[in-house]
Image: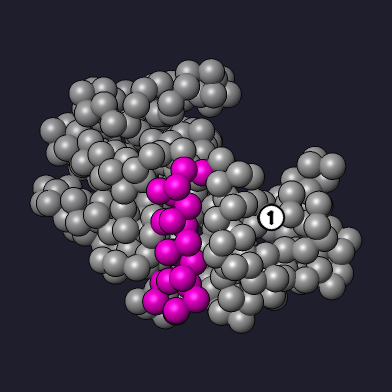
């Protein structure tokens, strides 16, 4: 029997799809998530459910034992009282367990901007994760640095429904690369199935083109029957209140998010390489007409 792949965060947008793609290719998968009940749909498709805490190194070492490869990430935790401490605790646990279990091939979900050591908010925790992964000299590691997730636009649905606008503290005229999580998952599964790993590598996933928030809002609006939908740049104070009261984020997470948005506005959160022909293909137009429009209707 072939050794399994381990997928961490298997109930999230990226991890669930990585798991499904590997299973569809006939690969054995250990699906790791916080809650067994949320892993059941993947178990019904053939995955081995592994409920547990990524901060539990002993649990992870057992899950990683004998694995052919592992997909790792630091899941969001919007109520973390100290978000940087949470990120570093999970990152340290993951890398320690990978080292002890001697996992030969690793794909790690990072982000555009992770090469920077300051000024990027939550991306700083991914910078730290990448630094830790560099200590795994006997493993082949691919660090994925995807762009701004198209799925982030789903957070705007209540605002669009209630106020008829889209908005955030990000400037309306800053070009930002945007990528669908489906494409991240496909790239990850392809790497594992093809087995093309060579040492330590960084791979950017940047979507077909850069878009400003004004351009993205127009595309989203057209997909939901609201042509001319406007984008408004909010003040940090207004955004802080919305994230705290509306989204239930901790103060630590809110301040990290605001710092990241400042980084976008300043133009520092950018890829260090030009978009390649191998970059991802899902357009915001197609995402908007399918996933975004569906979520907008369901929220009615």
Identified at 61% across, 60% down, the residue is 238
The magenta stretch spans residue 268: yes
* Residue 152, horizontal then vertical, whole percent: 59, 55
* Residue 59, horizontal then vertical, whole percent: 26, 23
Q: Is residue 271 above or below residue 7?
A: below
Q: Relative to 190, is 236 on the left or the right?
A: right
Quadrant containing the N terminus in the rendered view: top left
Identified at 73% across, 59% down, the residue is 288
**Segment colored magenta:** 249-269
* Residue 85, horizontal then vertical, whole percent: 28, 43
Identified at 84% across, 42% down, the residue is 300
Q: Residues within 10 Å of mark 1 (few under 14, many from 20)?
A: some
Is residue 276 shown to the viewer in this render? Answer: no
The residue nearer to you, when weighing 82 against 205, is 82
The residue nearer to you, when weighing 234 against 41, is 234
Identified at 62% across, 52% down, the residue is 242
* Residue 141, horizontal then vertical, whole percent: 25, 53
The magenta stretch spans residue 17: no
In which quarter of the view is residue 183 placed?
A: bottom right
- Could you tell me which secondary element the residue under label 1 belongs to? helix
Q: Main secondary structure of the magenta part?
A: helix
Q: Is residue 68 above or below residue 196?
A: above
Residue behind mark 1: 156
In which quarter of the view is residue 219 placed?
A: bottom right
Q: Is residue 185 above or below residue 49?
A: below
The residue nearer to you, when weighing 279 against 209, is 209
Is residue 227 shown to the viewer in this render? Answer: yes
């Amino acid at each position: 029997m072939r050794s399994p792949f381990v997928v961490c965060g298997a109930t999230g947008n990226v991890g669930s799809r990585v798991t499904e793609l590997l299973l569809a290719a006939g690969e054995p998968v250990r699906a790791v998530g916080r809650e067994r009940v949320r892993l059941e749909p993947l178990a019904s498709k053939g995955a081995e459910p592994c409920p547990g805490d990524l901060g539990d190194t002993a649990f992870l070492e057992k899950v990683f034992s004998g694995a052919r490869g592992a997909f790792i990430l630091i899941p969001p935790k919007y109520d973390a009282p100290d978000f940087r401490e949470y990120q570093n605790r999970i990152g340290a646990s993951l890398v320690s367990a990978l080292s002890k279990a001697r996992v030969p091939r690793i794909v790690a979900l990072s982000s555009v901007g992770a090469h920077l050591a300051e000024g990027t908010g939550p991306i700083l925790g991914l910078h730290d994760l990448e630094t830790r992964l560099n200590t795994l000299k006997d493993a082949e590691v691919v660090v994925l640095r995807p762009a701004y997730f198209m799925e982030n636009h789903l957070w705007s649905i209540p605002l669009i429904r209630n106020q008829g606008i889209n908005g955030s503290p990000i400037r309306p005229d800053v070009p930002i690369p945007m990528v669908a999580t489906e494409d991240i998952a496909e790239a990850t599964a392809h790497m594992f199935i093809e087995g093309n790993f060579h040492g330590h590598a960084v791979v950017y996933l940047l979507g077909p083109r850069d878009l400003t928030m004004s351009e993205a809002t127009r595309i989203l609006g057209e997909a939901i029957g609201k042509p001319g939908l406007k984008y408004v740049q909010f003040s940090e104070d207004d955004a802080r209140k919305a994230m705290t009261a509306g989204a239930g984020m901790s103060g630590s997470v809110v301040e990290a998010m605001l710092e990241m948005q400042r980084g976008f506005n300043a133009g520092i959160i950018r890829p260090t390489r030009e978009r390649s022909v191998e970059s991802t293909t899902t357009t915001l137009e197609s995402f908007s007409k399918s996933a975004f429009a569906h979520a907008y209707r369901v929220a009615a």
